[in-house]
Image (cartoon, rainbow, N blue to C red):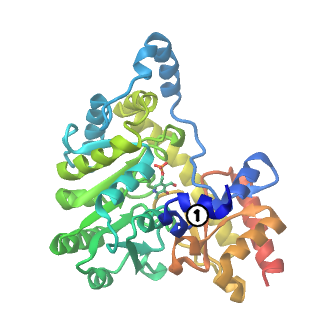
């Protein structure tokens, strides 16, 4: 078939979709995974294994009760799993969700975000995102012919969004604000005042607050801010097991929201994935047994990642004393402003990333991938490399900034 006939067959909407910028980095990350000499501060995957007792019980139980692992579940997910999720959410956030009506299990938070946006957006609608923000939202919004409207988050304001700007940008086409806390890429946790302001404005204007809580348990000094605690009805909370349980390969997450939202998500999910994978639901049911989860987070996940975060910050402060780097409160990333060293080169931060990879075999992610306000900063993952390699990576970066970048 010639190219013109072939493209006639595909949806016109596809030609408007850009490939996610992270795709351009995928080749570098693949190479980094197989070559020791490449240091990667690029990816977003946890570097730990899930809790040991979870893996042991999984193997034993799979052998004794194999049939349980290979079934369909209901579209909303196994009820026993949703019951455990409801208990867990209540324990950490204090908010009650009815497991039968107000929770749906999804294939990671990626499917959760997709279902929520699919249930809300039509051509011409608007949705508010922060700038910078996680790069997994924009393409879905454009797929539904809707428009994203950004509100700034400035480093000097601790990356908290401005409530005045939020209020100004809401109009009759606005359906929701989508925000994440703790945030990828900046590491900020929404302050309780700003969170309250967002929820109140959204309620007043009659729009949803969608909160992506993929990193809600990856917090270092203080708890995450739970927006649904302020007003459960207006808030759609999208969660993930990928980061907290170090299990991104299970592709499991969940959405908590009011009954009508969940019913609408279910309508779409039945034709996208029918239900989420049962193997992961069975294993994670066990993880949610609170002593396993609590112990794993407290004794393994948080101390390991906190030590790596602190060490990366120490190295940055040692080798780039003028960097004024801020301490991420949660999540996996340091967001580092490199404008003082890059001159005009920061305008094309993607080229800087490729050049740094070529010359120094170091992967970092350009801030412009997260929005215009991110330009000049770079996202450095601190969870994936050990301390020696974190130091070596920062040295390579500094060497590049002092010799090649100027
Ligand atoms: C903020 C945020 N949301 C959602 C996701 C998607 O994660 P998953 O689909 O594995 O739950 C990620 C992954 O890095 C993320 O950083």
**With respect to residue 51, does 222 lie above or below?**
below
The x and y percentages for residue 399 are: 80, 72
The picture quadrant where one finds residue 124 is bottom left
Q: Is residue 354 left or right of residue 237?
A: right
Q: Report how many numbered discs are placed on residues in the image.
A: 1
The x and y percentages for residue 393 are: 74, 61
> Which residue is drawn at the image coordinates 42% and 61% (left, top)?
182
> Which residue is drawn at the image coordinates 65% and 79% (left, top)?
338
Q: Is residue 60 visible?
A: yes
Q: Nearer the viewer, residue 147 or 365?
A: 147
**With respect to residue 152, does 319 lie above or below?**
above
The residue where tag 1 is placed is: 19
Q: Is residue 173 left or right of residue 348?
A: left
The x and y percentages for residue 358 are: 82, 66
Specify the farthest residue to the top: 64
Q: Quick one: quadrant of the N terminus?
A: bottom right
Element type at marker 1? loop
Label 1 near ligand 1 (CB < 8 Å): no
Q: Is residue 321 visible?
A: no
Q: Nearer the viewer, residue 237 or 194?
A: 237
> Which residue is drawn at the image coordinates 66% and 77% (left, top)?
349
Q: Is residue 346 left or right of residue 356?
A: left
Label 1 crowd (10 A; few <14 / some 14-19 / many >=20): few
Q: Nearer the viewer, residue 352 or 321?
A: 352
The x and y percentages for residue 323 are: 63, 78
Q: Quick one: quadrant of the C terminus?
A: bottom right
**With respect to residue 329, does 405 lie above or below?**
below
**With respect to residue 290, does 90 lie above or below?**
below
């Amino acid at each position: 078939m010639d190219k013109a006939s072939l493209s006639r067959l595909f949806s016109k909407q596809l030609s408007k979709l850009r490939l996610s910028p992270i795709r351009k980095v995928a080749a570098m990350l693949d190479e980094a995974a197989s070559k020791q000499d490449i240091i990667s501060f690029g990816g977003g995957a946890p570097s730990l294994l899930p809790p040991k007792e979870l893996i042991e019980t999984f193997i034993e139980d799979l052998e004794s009760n194999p049939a349980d692992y290979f079934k369909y579940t209901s579209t909303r997910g196994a009820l026993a799993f949703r019951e455990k999720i409801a208990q867990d959410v209540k324990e950490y956030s204090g908010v009650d969700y009815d497991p039968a009506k107000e929770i749906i299990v999804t294939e990671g938070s990626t499917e959760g975000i997709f279902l929520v946006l699919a249930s809300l957006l039509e051509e011409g609608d608007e949705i508010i995102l922060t700038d910078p923000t996680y790069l997994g939202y924009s393409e879905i919004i454009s797929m539904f012919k809707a428009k994203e409207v950004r509100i700034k988050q400035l480093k000097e304001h601790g990356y908290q969004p401005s409530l005045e700007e939020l209020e100004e940008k809401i109009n009759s086409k606005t359906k929701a604000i989508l925000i994440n806390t703790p945030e990828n890429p900046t590491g900020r946790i929404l302050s309780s005042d700003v969170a309250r302001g967002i929820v109140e404005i959204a309620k007043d204007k009659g729009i949803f607050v969608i909160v992506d809580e993929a990193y809600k348990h990856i917090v270092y000094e203080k708890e995450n801010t739970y927006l649904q605690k302020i007003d459960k009805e207006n808030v759609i909370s999208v969660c993930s097991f990928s980061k907290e349980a170090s299990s991104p390969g299970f592709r499991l997450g969940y959405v908590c929201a009011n009954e009508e939202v969940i019913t609408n998500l279910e309508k779409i999910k039945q034709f996208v994935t029918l239900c989420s994978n049962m193997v992961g639901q069975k294993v994670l049911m066990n993880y949610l047994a609170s002593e396993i989860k609590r112990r794993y987070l407290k004794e393994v996940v948080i101390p390991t990642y906190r030590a790596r975060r602190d060490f990366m910050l120490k190295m940055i402060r040692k080798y780039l004393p003028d960097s004024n780097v801020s301490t991420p409160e949660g999540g996996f990333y340091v967001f580092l402003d490199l404008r003082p060293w890059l001159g005009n080169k920061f305008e094309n931060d993607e080229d800087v990333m490729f050049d740094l990879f070529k010359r120094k075999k170091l992967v970092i992610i350009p801030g412009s991938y997260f929005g215009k306000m991110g330009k000049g900063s770079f996202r450095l993952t601190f969870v994936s490399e050990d301390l020696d390699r974190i130091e070596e990576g920062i040295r390579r970066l500094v060497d590049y900034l002092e010799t090649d970048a100027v």
